[in-house]
Image: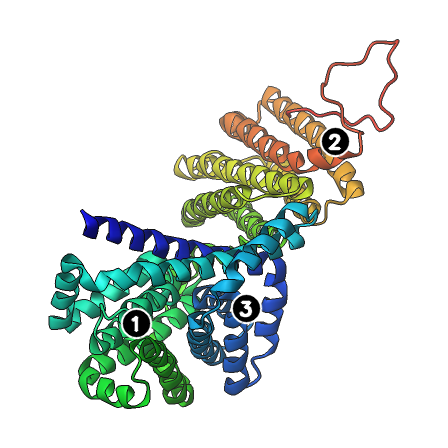
Amino acid sequence: MESTIQLIDLLGAAALLFWGLRLIKTGVMRAFGAVLRQWISRGTRNRVSAAAWGFLATLGLQSSTATAVITGSFASREIISPRMAQAVMLGANLGTAIVTVLLSRDLHWLGSAFILVGVASFTLSAGSQGKAVGRALLGLGLMLLALRLLGGVTEPLRDSRTVVAMLSGLADAPAFALVFSAGLALLGSSSLAVVLLVMFLAGAGVVPPQLALVLVAGANLGGAIPPYLAVGGDGLAARRLTLANLMVRGVGALAVLVVAGPLTRLLLQVTPDPADLTVAAHVGFNAALLLLFLPLIGPVGALAERVLPSGGAAARSGPEYLDDSLLDTPGLALAVAARETLRVGDIVGAMLEKSRLSLENSDEATGLEVTRLEQEVDALTEAIKLYVSRLSRLELDAADVRRANEIISYAINLEHMGDIIETGLTEIAVKKIRKRLMLSPEGLVEIAEFYDRTADNLRLAQAIFLGRDADLARQLMQSKIEIRKLEANSAAQHLARVRAGRSEAIETSTIHLDLLRDLKRVNAHLTSVAHPILHEIGVLQDSRVRASQSEPKPALGLQDSGN
């Protein structure tokens, strides 16, 4: 029972260590995330400066994973070349090792002070940056407190038969110990916390020095897996970067596994204290990888390209701009979510054009391409909704909440437009092709004009969504009236041709009217982007019902209508 209680105390202290690290990363990203991103993007002129900026950024973030996600997003957008991005990662790995050195010092007396200042800053600050700094200081204080708890918990563990038996088994199976430590780092998304835990166990005599080296190597290997998983949706370049970093750490871990015995005897001559030996091994591991692989970033990148070759259009699918590392910085996160939504709008525009070409040229293959694009629209819309939903769990101000709602609303409307284009306009075009029907020349001109007006309104809606311009919003709402007139005039002229006995008009009557209906539905979804802007300035009515004579009429005559 006593061993069980000691194990619970150990796990609790380790959990507090992980949580403190998370608070630091979150606070620093929210307070200084934009600045750190600028540093990384501007400091990559050569491999040495790139490694240096990666080192400095990780000192601030307390996490090489966060640096990896940021750098991966830059690499996927070609802001940083793949080679310089790999150099940033090598510097980031050393940066997190130096953080271990700082935290291994006896600084527990600062823990209470940081907790006090952090709570005060978070509570009293009105701005988001002050709260973020308070969160980071609170996290640092909790980490120091956790380290103090670990020191007290690990001391009696040397007498625990259960722990000694378990660790003796790991010492006899170094390969399993390597995998076990990598699994802990993967579960905690941090090699830093695992190394600190091993340091305290080694200092208490629970972990022998040679096993400590293997566990440190495993922690470094496991710490490279979360970045690879985190950039899964950021594109091929980001995945190659994090895979290259994983391969580099994997080579280092295997080398330590092979030479653990002689390497331990060498380090014991320099640092006989087991705790210091653990920290030195962590720093030496990452310093050696930096010195060895910095000249080889080209071949390492080439190997990653061979493992993850380009896959054509499939490689470009998925979100391009959504960056999980920005979720701690709401302003930047909303900006990239808006950019991804604009990309969805561009795809919907391509669908609209292809459906038109399919109709005019009787090309069924072009219509089939619309289905593929619609699947991409659905996938991107789902990714945007999930991304903004995760962001909405944070403490957002009123403006950020409003913008988040606008992004989700516009994305959903674009998704509905994609559905209408695929299941409505394109299916109508395919039906026309398969039945060998032809629209009347006049009808084709009218439909083409409707398509042109819809494409113009889509471009206008994209501009409104990006810039929130009230004048453009009024213009889009005014176009709604013109669209209604365009539909009515075309329907009236088509019915006149039917009454005149025009055979092509009679054969395609349903097709013509269905095309008008679906294009009008697309435009109705487009005008929705103007509603929140016009509501804010108070020129949009909540009802289409005409006001009574005793009530003043709206000055601009703008109405919030469905169609």
Q: Mark 1 points at which residue?
A: 203
Q: Nearer the viewer, mark 1 or mark 3?
A: 1
For label 3, the SS is: helix
Q: Where is residue 264 in the image (x, y as percent from the top left)?
A: 23, 84
Q: Mark 2 points at which residue?
A: 535
Q: Which of 77 and 413 is in front in this view?
A: 77
Q: Position of residue 205 (x, y in %)?
A: 24, 71
Q: Tell me which corner region of the image, top left, top right, bottom left or bottom right, holds residue 315.
A: bottom left
Q: Mark 3 points at which residue?
A: 60
Q: Where is residue 194 in the image (x, y as percent from the top left)?
A: 33, 65
In-image side of 449 versus 304 (left or right): right
For label 1, the SS is: helix
Q: In this view, does 112 lie above or below 399?
A: below
Q: Where is residue 46 in the image (x, y as percent from the top left)?
A: 54, 86
Q: How far apart are marks 3 and 2 (CA)?
A: 42 Å
Q: Nearer the viewer, residue 530 or 447?
A: 530
Q: Is residue 83 above or below residue 411?
A: below
Label 3 amino acid?
A: Gly
For label 2, the SS is: helix
Label 2 amino acid?
A: His
Answer whether labels 3 and 2 touch (C-beta < 8 Å): no
Q: Tell me which corner region of the image, top left, top right, bottom left or bottom right, holds residue 45.
A: bottom right
- Classify the position of the C terminus by image quarter: top right
Q: Nearer the viewer, mark 2 or mark 1?
A: 1
Residue at image x 25%, y 71%?
215
Label 1 amino acid?
A: Gly
Q: Tell me which corner region of the image, top left, top right, bottom left or bottom right, holds residue 406.
A: top right
Task: Count the labels in the image.
Answer: 3
Q: In this view, does 542 lie above or below 22?
A: above
